Amino acid sequence: MGFSATPGWDLRVLGYWQLRFDGLPVEVGARQQRLLAALALLHTQPRHVLAALLWPNSPERQSAGNLRASVFRISHELPRLLSATDPLQLDAAARVDLRKVRELITEITLTGTRSVLPASIDLLQEANLLPGWYEEWVIDQQDHLLNQRVDALETVARSYLATGSFGRALGAARAAAVVDPLRESAQHLLVRCHLAEDNYASAVQVYRSYRALLRRELGIAPSPHFAELLGLEFATSDSRLLVRSVKN
């Protein structure tokens, strides 16, 4: 996702963290990066909440002091990026790439496939939130956004299937399976798309690849209901595998 050519602040948290002003990268300290990321992910937050979130292992007075110092530096070195003192928030004019993804997810939830273009599918597939950040508050938001992205892609795939747009349904289902390869509902939709196009061999290949992935990663098998899409032989075989994996 590119940055806007419009003058002002642009904050990127998808794929990597970066702040730009009028299109040019701006150097920002690690503490200030974390504060700006928290505001981008969590919107408006009281100071005491942010202090506890960003410095959970520090005494309350020290974490509050760390936050004051970070806010001071941002206010003086990055003017008009913050718009409030308590609760804190980013200025309304600052552009954050995550907002576009969240707006797209909301639109899909409300309208299904309406106005969903291939570029929107790509955006949902590629919108990885702050990869390499391992703080608990970030991981929670990463998991939440991942689930929202898969839900939205599955909604699009089901809608296209229902209207007979099998090629578009397949693209959305593939994207959902890429975002979360272990999620059975995404793989289930992918198989249904292949079957809708009378492409049984591809459907079987998707199922077998998913079965091997589950066995390798989790030591379990797909649900019997999933296997039944492809015939009783697969369902019976996988039921035995599932029973063995549970007993072990």
Image: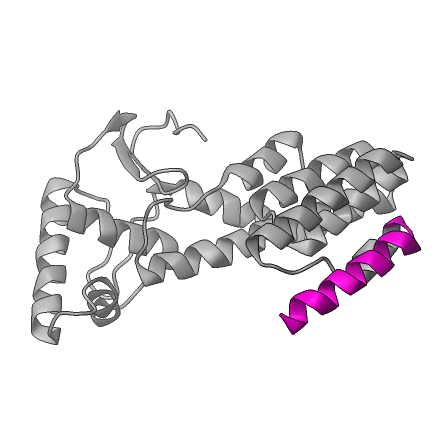
* Residue 208 vertical placement versus 8 (above, below): below
In percent of the image, x 70 and y 58: which residue is there?
A: 221
| Horizontal relation, residue 207 to residue 55: left or right | right
Locate residue 195, reporting x and y percent: 87, 41
* Residue 149 vertical placement versus 14 (above, below): below
Q: Main secondary structure of the magenta part?
A: helix
Q: Residue 5 magenta-drawn?
A: no
Locate residue 2, reporting x and y percent: 42, 28
Q: Residue 246 magenta-drawn?
A: yes
Q: Nearer the viewer, residue 222 or 59?
A: 222
Res 235 → quadrant: bottom right
Res 98 → quadrant: top left
In percent of the image, x 49 and y 59: which residue is there?
A: 144
Question: Which quadrant does the N terminus fall into?
Answer: top left
| Horizontal relation, residue 85 to residue 150: left or right | left
Q: Nearer the viewer, residue 193 or 123?
A: 193
Q: Nearer the viewer, residue 17 or 135?
A: 135
Q: Is residue 20 visible?
A: yes
Q: Nearer the viewer, residue 242 or 224?
A: 242
Span shown in magenta:
230-248
Q: Is residue 164 visible?
A: no
Res 167 → quadrant: top right
For the rendered model, the colour scheme is one colour
Tag count: 0
* Residue 45 vertical placement versus 104 (above, below): below
| Horizontal relation, residue 180 to residue 154: left or right | left
| Horizontal relation, residue 148 to residue 188: left or right | left
Locate residue 162, reporting x and y percent: 86, 47
Locate residue 152, reporting x and y percent: 64, 50
In percent of the image, x 70 and y 50: which residue is there?
A: 211
